[in-house]
Image (cartoon, rainbow, N blue to C red):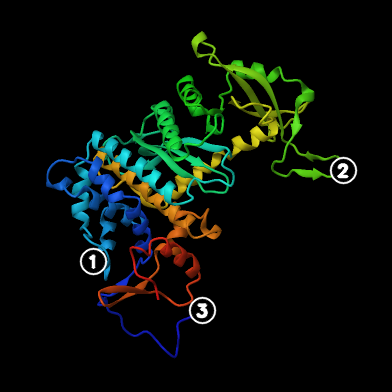
């Protein structure tokens, strides 16, 4: 493709008052309005001074800007272009929204957490956000933290964490149902040098409580909490078990774990579908260099009150690292990866348990998605303001996910960037007739069908598209 020779572009002017650069905000904010985002923020947020006034409108504006692609306070200016003041009420200036964020304290962030939880519940009631193909299907709750890099020493709470990068630590809990993309059911911003398990037990309890409100028909044992070895500890595991969930947590290679692995009989190892695996149809089994086995295991034996029975599932793969002395080995050398789980072996056998546990890596995609969106920066020097920014980013993430689920299977598992490109950042021109606005969108838009499906769900608040 090249520039047209018959119709060359010779001039440009930013002078059209009837254009929208992100027409997808119309149905998306219609969905947010249906879920009562404005009213929830007004009800639960009690920010002081005039900077905290009209909290509902300001929270909605911040979420809308993030949905449209804003990753800093200055980027909120995109809410004030062209026909935005005509289509939307109160498109606040970035400076006003920045002052609003700087008013937050820790208590106000917790109030905003309550807004986010109730907003997610509203989204789940109005969209198939957490609906699986089977009502009794297993729900997977993943817990992990990530470092959001910051620059300069003016950021309150910033420090060097386990990655060696200066930043702040964001702890995230997600929930995934069969056939759906993950949604975020819990979030907390912590100082950069914070250890991963700090506050994790409270996060697990809150996340499972939120999930219980989203899916009240859950049966016992239908929720599995997955985490890596940083969260292998009695507080986190016991919090999940008290809430009625099972756990699947990677363990550290301590002397106790190594002794348990050594006690596994050699005949107990089963080849699994793994990298470079080949399925032998005649033998009916996988031919693979990776194998799994399990053994009964009691975790946290330091105190009798903390002992937790379960099973240790171990995956072993050949150790292919080159030896520095250039000599081979007299026998096979293995690398072991083990995790502790409380799931019923009659329901989830060794191979299935290992496969499900490896799926924990999906939370890394959520981290990447957030950092490719509103969490690309933590814009304020104040820790509480950045904490509020994280909660708002999560609300925008879940709202974007919910909007995509209304459009059909094509975008049900799409990333935020894809949803924004196909549904949100759609240019449109407004036309007014009899005090009704009509959006004129581009002809032959590749995702016209999906956009119209989303719009249909909120057309009782908006006019039809032509």
- Secondary-structure class at tag 1: helix
Look at mark 3 in the image and give the residue it sits on: 1
Q: What separation in Å lies between label 1 and label 2 (alpha carbons)?
A: 68 Å
Q: CA distance from mark 1 to mark 3?
A: 36 Å
Q: Earlier in the sequence, mark 1 or mark 3?
A: 3
Residue that badge 1 annotates: 85
Residue topped by disc 2: 282
Which percent across, then down, holds residue 36? 31, 50
Q: Secondary structure at mark 2?
A: loop
Above or below, 425 against 97 in this view is below
In terms of depth relative to the viewer, which is nearer, 451 or 197?
A: 451
Q: Which mark is residue 247?
A: none
Whole-angstrom CA distance, mark 2 to mark 3, is: 52 Å
Mark 2 neighbour class, 10 Å CA radius: few under 14, some 14 to 19, many 20 or more: few
Q: Nearer the viewer, residue 244 or 61?
A: 244
> Does any portion of residue 150 appear in the rendered image?
no
Q: In the drawing, does residue 330 fall left or right of residue 307?
A: right
Q: Nearer the viewer, mark 2 or mark 3?
A: 2
Q: Earlier in the sequence, mark 2 or mark 3?
A: 3
Name the image quarter holding residue 354.
top right
Q: In terms of secondary structure, where does tag 3 sit?
A: loop
């Amino acid at each position: 493709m090249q520039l047209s020779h018959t119709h060359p572009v010779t001039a440009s002017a930013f002078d059209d008052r009837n254009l929208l650069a992100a027409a997808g905000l119309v149905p998306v904010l219609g969905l947010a309005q249906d879920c009562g985002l404005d009213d929830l923020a007004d009800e639960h947020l009690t920010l002081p001074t005039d900077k905290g006034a009209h909290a509902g409108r300001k929270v909605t504006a911040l979420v809308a800007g993030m949905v449209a692609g804003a990753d800093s306070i200055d980027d909120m200016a995109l809410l004030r272009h062209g026909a935005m003041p005509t289509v939307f009420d109160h498109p606040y200036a970035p400076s006003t929204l920045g002052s609003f964020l700087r008013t937050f304290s820790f208590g106000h962030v917790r109030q905003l957490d309550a807004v986010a939880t109730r907003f997610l519940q509203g989204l789940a009631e109005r969209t198939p956000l957490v609906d699986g193909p089977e009502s009794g299907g297993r729900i997977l709750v993943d817990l992990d933290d990530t470092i959001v890099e910051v620059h300069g020493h003016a950021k309150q709470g910033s420090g060097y964490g386990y990655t060696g990068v200066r930043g702040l630590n964001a702890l995230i809990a997600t929930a995934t149902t069969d056939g759906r993309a993950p949604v975020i059911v819990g979030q907390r911003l912590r100082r950069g040098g914070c250890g991963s398990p700090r506050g994790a037990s409270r996060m697990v309890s809150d996340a499972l409580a939120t999930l219980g409100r989203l899916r009240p028909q859950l049966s016992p044992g239908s929720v599995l909490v997955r985490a890596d070895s940083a969260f292998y500890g009695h507080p986190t595991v016991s919090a999940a078990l008290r809430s009625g969930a099972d756990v699947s947590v990677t363990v550290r290679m301590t002397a106790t774990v190594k002794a348990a692995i050594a006690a596994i009989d050699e005949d107990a190892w089963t080849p699994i579908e793994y990298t470079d695996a080949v399925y032998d149809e005649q033998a009916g089994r996988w031919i693979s260099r990776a194998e799994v086995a399990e053994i009964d295991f009691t975790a946290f034996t330091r105190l009798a009150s903390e002992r937790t029975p379960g099973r240790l599932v171990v995956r072993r793969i050949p150790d292919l690292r080159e030896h520095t002395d250039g000599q081979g080995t007299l026998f096979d050398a293995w690398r072991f990866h083990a995790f502790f789980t409380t799931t019923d072996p009659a329901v989830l056998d060794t191979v299935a348990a290992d496969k499900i546990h490896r799926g924990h890596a999906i939370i890394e995609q959520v981290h990447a998605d957030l950092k490719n969106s509103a969490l690309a920066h933590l814009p304020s020097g104040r820790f509480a303001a950045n904490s509020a920014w994280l909660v708002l980013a999560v609300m925008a993430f879940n709202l974007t996910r919910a909007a995509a689920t209304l459009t059909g299977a094509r975008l049900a598992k799409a990333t935020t960037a894809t949803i924004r490109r196909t549904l949100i950042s759609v240019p449109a021109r407004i036309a007014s007739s009899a005090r009704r606005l009509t959006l004129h969108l581009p002809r032959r838009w590749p995702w016209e069908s999906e956009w119209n499906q989303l719009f249909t769900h909120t057309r009782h608040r908006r006019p039809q598209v032509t």
